Amino acid sequence: MSLTLNIELSDRDLQHFTGMIETARKAAGNKSTDEIVQAATQLLDKAQHNHSPEFVKDRLQLLDTLIAMIRDEGWALAEEDATHVRSALVYFATPSDAIPDSVPVLGFLDDAIMIELCARELHHEIEAYEDFCDFRQRESERRGLKPETVGRADWLGSRREELQERMHLRRSRDFDAGQGFGSGYGGSSSYGPIRRYSDGGWRPGLFKFR
């Protein structure tokens, strides 16, 4: 028998988690990209040995996507865009944890909430990257190639530029509307239903649930 629980966070709750994110960003300000990615990767590695509910699993898959966005040679994020993603990942490079990861079932719940908040801030980046991965998958198959071998192939360039320009325009629109980076995580968001990792095209992911 399964049990469904709905969690609703109030503005006060969101302020608590937002404060934790900002504290982590200040504490990890001098950490390198490699250190930040390694810390997030370690979280994923621990999570695969934990029997987590679907809510947590879906968010950990989102974390894997954020890591892939930085590592993906074909996506080739500009430094400013990579900084946005690093800023989201930096929480996982600090030792703060509201719920110890060792707690059965719920140990990664606070991490999942943090990932959800970061994903809402980066939903345009995630949407653009997933569209890119889908395109790369389809085109690679059509050309008889494996997507993990194409790197920064010339035929990817125009689609990558188109999607990243779309990402920039939408992010700029949100910023002008007061919903951009640094505006907080509360309130409404256009971030839509989570796409499971296995539904999209190939990306240099680090983790899959067993």
Image: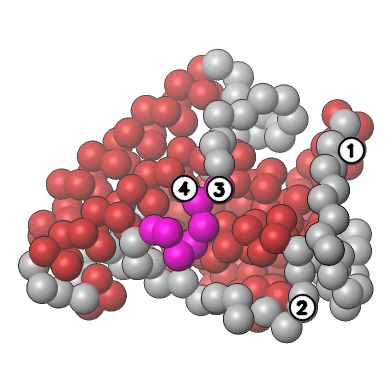
- Is 197 in the magenta? yes
- Badge 3 marks a residue whose secondary structure is loop
Given the image, on which type of amino acid does mark 2 rest? Asn
Residue 166's image quarter?
A: top left
Residue in front for this viewpoint, 195 or 39: 195
Mark number, residue 13: 1
Q: Closer to the N terminus: mark 4 or mark 3?
A: 4
**Where 46 falls versus 151 (above or below)?**
below
Report the mark closest to the observer, 2 or 1.
Answer: 2
Magenta stretch: give its range.
Answer: 194-200
Residue that label 4 marks: 126
Q: What is the count of numbered marks?
A: 4
Name the residue beneath numbered marker 3: 194
Q: Is residue 78 visible?
A: no
Q: Position of residue 210 (x, y in %)?
A: 60, 81
Amino acid type assigned to the residue bearing label 4 in the image: Ile
Q: Could you tell which of marks 2 and 4 lies nearer the N-terminus?
A: 2
Disc 1 and disc 4: Cα gap in Å? 25 Å
The residue wearing badge 2 is 50
User: Of marks 2 and 1, which one's residue comes earlier in the chain?
Assistant: 1
Q: CA distance from mark 4 to mark 3?
A: 10 Å
From the image, which quarter does the N terminus lie in? bottom right
Classed neighbour count for the residue bearing mark 1: other residues with Cα under 10 Å, few (<14), some (14–19), many (≥20): few
Which residue is farthest front?
Answer: 1
Local SS, label 1:
helix
Mark positioned earlier in the residue sequence (1 or 4)? 1
134 left or right, relative to 92:
left
Q: Is residue 137 above or below residue 161?
A: below
Please determine whether, in this image, residue 30 is positioned above or below residue 128: below
Label 1 vs 3, first from the N-terminus: 1
Q: Quadrant of residue 143?
A: bottom left
Name, please, the residue furthest toward the top. 177
